[in-house]
Amino acid sequence: AASTAARRAPAPTPAAAADARPSVAVLPFANTSGDARDEHLSDGLTEELIAALSRVHGLDVIARTSVFALKGKPLGVRAVAETLGVSSVVEGSLRRVGGRLKVTARLARAGDGRVLWSETYDRELRDVFAMQEEIARAIVGALRVRLAGAGRPLLVGRATDDPVAYDLFLRGRQAFSAGSGPADVRRAVALFDSAVARDPAFAQAHAGLSDAHARLVAFGFGRPRDELPLAEAAALRALALDPTVAAARAALAHALYLRGGARDSAERAMRRALALDPGYVLGRSAFAIWLQFQGRFAEAVAQMDTAAALDPLAANVGTVLGRAYVNAGRSDDAIRALQGALALGPGHPLVLQQLGHAYLQKGMAAEALDALRRAAAASGARDSAHLAYAYGVTGDRAEAARNVAALEASAARRFVPPFDLAIAHVGVGDRDAAFRRIERALAEGVLVRDVLTGTAALRPLHADARWTRLVRRLDREERAAALSAAAPAAP
């Protein structure tokens, strides 16, 4: 049966909606300030409400990527609900006037567009958290969802008393969400750094800083031995300040996993993060990637099925699913998932990269080379290495060799992910160079055993005696690291 990640849940009918579990999409609040520089405030309010409502047991909330995919589109409530498969929609606007925020918000029912609740707020910027709490509680009340817990548990909480730190944090989150280029991620690092410098007790800003350092590693923009310790330290600081910050726990889990020898600790941390925030799609995606590299494909697909229901318009869901299918050798399933992801995120380099590998498995050389050329044009060195691999395995060894030589020359001047270079060398049949690059990747701290053994493109190395020795060595090192309790305990 096809994964639910490849299909969209239908919107509930008005009759069914009354009996079904309530679901809501919070559309991006419109910035009516007349100043594009205030966009981070309206986006930030939207994201905070999504996060707050996602913590409510018994309420399904569409994640950020899908609602922001509809930003600025002239869709009515019913069209939005049908697109996202929800029974209700929140929409509103934000206007900044000096140090004050003027916010309007309303909740409408999908079936007939009836407004269930609406309100207007005029507050000082320093009172933004109290306003967010009021809006979230009003929405929960209008949907008649009972809040779990004794007393009146906070949905938002007061993250910082410094409005400047909060503004920097929102700008950092905006940069982090803007795209996958190195400039955006480094700008996010700088803004989160500034936020925690203003308020060292700002747990969410520390969590954002951890995510940004980890993304520099994941996308090949920074040296793992430089970035991973910073990611881990920021996550631990966030958790020490507030153990309920799910993003910090997920960021710590990611750093622990990449370090190696801490697989069990990483999995416990990630499961705890998802228990704290079941709607945290970024965490589910990372978890699914680890699971598939461990050969736990059914568990990985289950995580992405949940992610697809929460974030139906997110290209990342299909990308992760497609990557799992590529490494499982299920090329037809991979192509189906990745083509769906490409329709949602045209030109995304990682989608194109994995689609290229799926086409190679299927024997579709022309399609593979086309996808990988587009990926290389979009992202540069990392995907140029995969293009070199494709030239090699499809028979154009001369073009593959030219690409590999250019990449090696580039690596002498700047950081080029050595793991991807190893894949390029496999494509030209140079096993010696491939093993040298794998050793370099291990020395950089970017490669763990699961990724090494779970990557389909490296399978030509498996028959080499050096592969067996390498895997055995990594097994010993990971067991020793686990026994020495090298992984720090999270609060």
Image (spheres, helix red, strand yellow):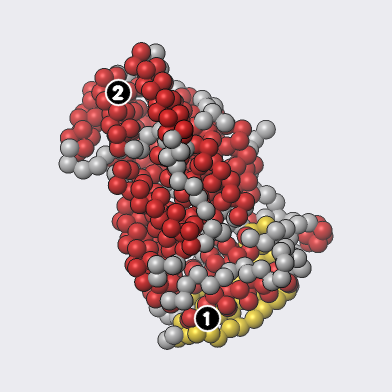
Which residue lies most toward the front here? 484
Q: Is residue 408 left or right of residue 311?
A: left
> Vertical placement of 223 versus 421: above or below?
below
Q: What is the x, y in percent for residue 470?
A: 36, 21
Q: Of residues 266 and 167, which is closer to you in this image?
A: 266
Q: Which residue is mark 2?
A: 435
Quadrant occupied by the N terminus: top right
Residue 485 visible, this angle: yes
Dot 1: few (<14), some (14–19), or many (≥20) neighbours within 10 Å? some
Residue 168 visible, this angle: no
Residue 127: mark in rendering: 1
Q: Is residue 178 left or right of residue 306?
A: left
Q: What is the x, y in percent for residue 183?
A: 30, 56
User: What residue is shown at x 49% (from left), y 47% (from top)?
Assistant: 489
Which of the 4 image quadrants contains residue 371? top left
Which of the 4 image quadrants contains residue 53? bottom right
Q: Of residues 313 and 79, which is closer to you in this image?
A: 313
Q: Could you tell me the amino acid type at mark 2?
A: Phe
User: What residue is shown at x 39% (from left), y 67% (from top)?
Assistant: 200
Q: Is residue 490 left or right of residue 418?
A: right
Q: What is the x, y in percent for residue 329?
A: 51, 25
Q: What is the x, y in percent for residue 172?
A: 39, 64
Report how far apart the C-alphas of labels 2 and 1 lie in the structure: 57 Å
Q: Could you tell me the amino acid type at mark 1?
A: Asp
> Vertical placement of 241 versus 396: above or below?
below
Q: Is residue 248 left or right of residue 309?
A: left
